[in-house]
Image (tube, rainbow, N blue to C red):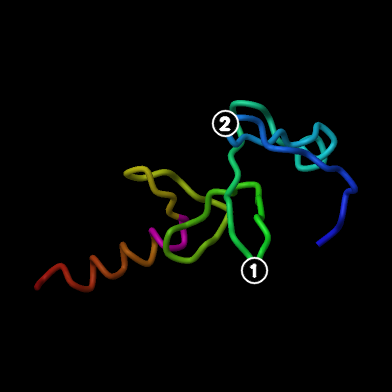
Amino acid sequence: MKSTGIIRGLDNMGRVVIPKEIRKFLDMTEGKDEFEIYMQDDCIVLKKHKPTCIFCNAEENCIEFENQMVCKKCIDKMQIIKEENSNI
């Protein structure tokens, strides 16, 4: 983990401002991008959220279905399973 030397405090509602330099480096847009929050030992880790396939975690060729992301490869596999079991 790389130290930035930037120190921020919590406001009275428990919020922390992510410095502009870090948001710019991660190409994060206000109101658009989200981040994931993890606990690792005694650290709080913020990670830019990248939607991935719920089955294989692929980042590319994903479409949203029922508020979940599914990649084309997994859709193709499900189609094969459907065809193989169509006479059950």
Residue at image position (57%, 31%) is: 13
Q: Position of residue 36 (x, y in %)?
A: 57, 49
Magenta stretch holds residue 35? no
Q: Is 53 in front, or is 84? A: 53
Q: Residues within 10 Å of mark 1 (few under 14, many from 20)?
A: few
Q: Quadrant of residue 11?
A: top right
Extreme-left residue of the structure? 88
Q: Which secondary structure type mostly characterizes the magenta part of the structure?
A: helix
Which residue position holds label 2? 13
Residue at image position (59%, 60%) is: 39
Q: Quadrant of the N terminus?
A: bottom right
Q: Residues within 10 Å of mark 2 (few under 14, many from 20)?
A: few
Residue at image position (39%, 62%) is: 76
In the figure, 14 relative to 82: above or below?
A: above
User: Which label's residue is closer to the chain start, 1 or 2?
Assistant: 2
Which residue position holds label 1? 41
Residue type for callout 2: Met
Q: Position of residue 75 (x, y in %)?
A: 38, 58
**How far is disc 1 from disc 2 in space, using C-alphas?**
24 Å
**Of helix, strand and loop, which one carries label 2?**
loop
Q: Is 69 in front, or is 17? A: 17
Extreme-right residue of the structure? 5
Position of residue 30 in the picture relative to residue 85 (left or right): right
Magenta residues span 71-75
Residue type for callout 1: Asp
Q: Position of residue 47 (x, y in %)?
A: 65, 51
Magenta stretch holds residue 72? yes
Position of residue 57 in the picture relative to residue 54 (left or right): right
Q: Position of residue 12 (x, y in %)?
A: 61, 30
